[in-house]
Image: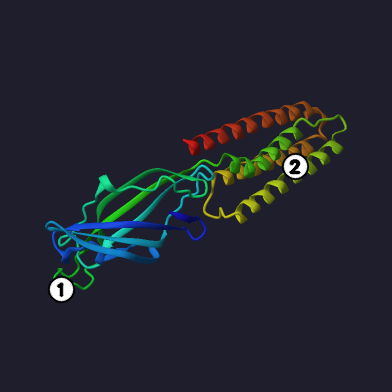
Amino acid sequence: MYGLDVSPRTINADFWLWSVCPSADLDATKRLEFVNATQVTQSDRSVEKVGTEYWSQVKVSGTFRQHFDLGEYPFDKQDVRILIEDSEFSSPQFTYVPDVANSGYDHEISLGGFKIRDFSARVVTHTYQTSFGDPRITHGQNSQYSQFDLNLKLVRDDVAGFVRESWPAYVAFLISFITYWMWSKDLLPVIGARYGILGASLFSVVVNMRSSSLAGTLFGVTLVDQIQLATLLYTLIAVGCTTYILWRWADHESNPVVRRVNNLVAVSTSAVYLIANAISIGFAIT
């Protein structure tokens, strides 16, 4: 396996399939349909009679469509599947039986940050909501085909990538947190400085989100996206708190209340931010 690409959502694979059948007519390697392939080639096919059975082999090379869930990127887990059906016989006529004991994969496979955690070869019955016009099937009934399912479970543990993509958000959080403690009797210059710092923090997070998207993670909300969005929300709350202070500061009698509100917002929002981050990262890495 190679060429895992989350942008077109495909993976390339080279593998061998074999069949052991009681007759040459039932040779499964002659009627292979690769359900989720965009392109596939078969080569080096061989057939040999061994005793009363026919043993055939074929090498398959192809590109296969996948569903990649990047919700926990860069600690995401992916299921790579290759689905195979018989192109002629339905399940009442022909059924695969997986050779589990002899099925496996090359443990030297490298998939650019992913590790193969598990492999399975199983057979399921896939139902189509049509008879395909087969006169032997009652009109309106479904068709069922034996489906061979090759499944590899991949896991990515890219700590360096996580640090590289998320540290600007955490720096922005720290800078925004510091602004809560910028205080002076002559508050108007301080308020102006707070607005300037918070604006710079917002800009840095937006730029970092843009660079992450250009890096190829435009599929839903990833873990890094969650952290960046949380940082944006945290900074916007800080902007709102600063605006509240500016609005109420002219009323000198309410100044102690305003200061307490500032401290309460600083502590509560920071605690929620850090706890939410810890929970999100914890779910992603387990």
Of the residues tagged 2 and 1, which is closer to the observer? 1
Q: Amino acid at mark 2?
A: Leu
At x 41%, y 57%, the residue is 13
Q: For the residue carrying disc 2, how many other residues have a C-alpha within 10 Å: few (<14), some (14-19), or many (20+)?
A: many
In the shown orientation, is residue 144 left or right of residue 12? left
Q: Amino acid at mark 1?
A: Pro
Q: Quadrant of residue 187?
A: top right
Q: State the residue in front, 153 or 225.
A: 153
Q: For the residue carrying disc 1, how many other residues have a C-alpha within 10 Å: few (<14), some (14-19), or many (20+)?
A: few
At x 33%, y 47%, the residue is 104
Q: Quadrant of residue 235?
A: top right
Q: CA distance from mark 2 to mark 1?
A: 71 Å
Q: Position of residue 27 (x, y in %)?
A: 20, 63
Query: Which mark, by number, is residue 246?
Result: none
Image position of 245 with respect to 76: above or below? above
Outermost residue on the left side: it is 52
Quadrant showing the N terminus: bottom left
Question: What residue did someone put label 2 on?
Answer: 198
Question: What residue did someone put label 1 on?
Answer: 135
Q: Position of residue 64 (x, y in %)?
A: 41, 60
Secondary element type, mark 1: loop
Residue 12 in sight here = yes
In the shown orientation, is residue 117 left or right of residue 187? left
Q: Position of residue 207 (x, y in %)?
A: 69, 51
Q: Position of residue 218 (x, y in %)?
A: 55, 55
Q: Earlier in the sequence, mark 2 or mark 1?
A: 1
Secondary element type, mark 2: helix
Q: How is the image coloured?
A: rainbow
Image position of 237 with respect to 268: above or below? below
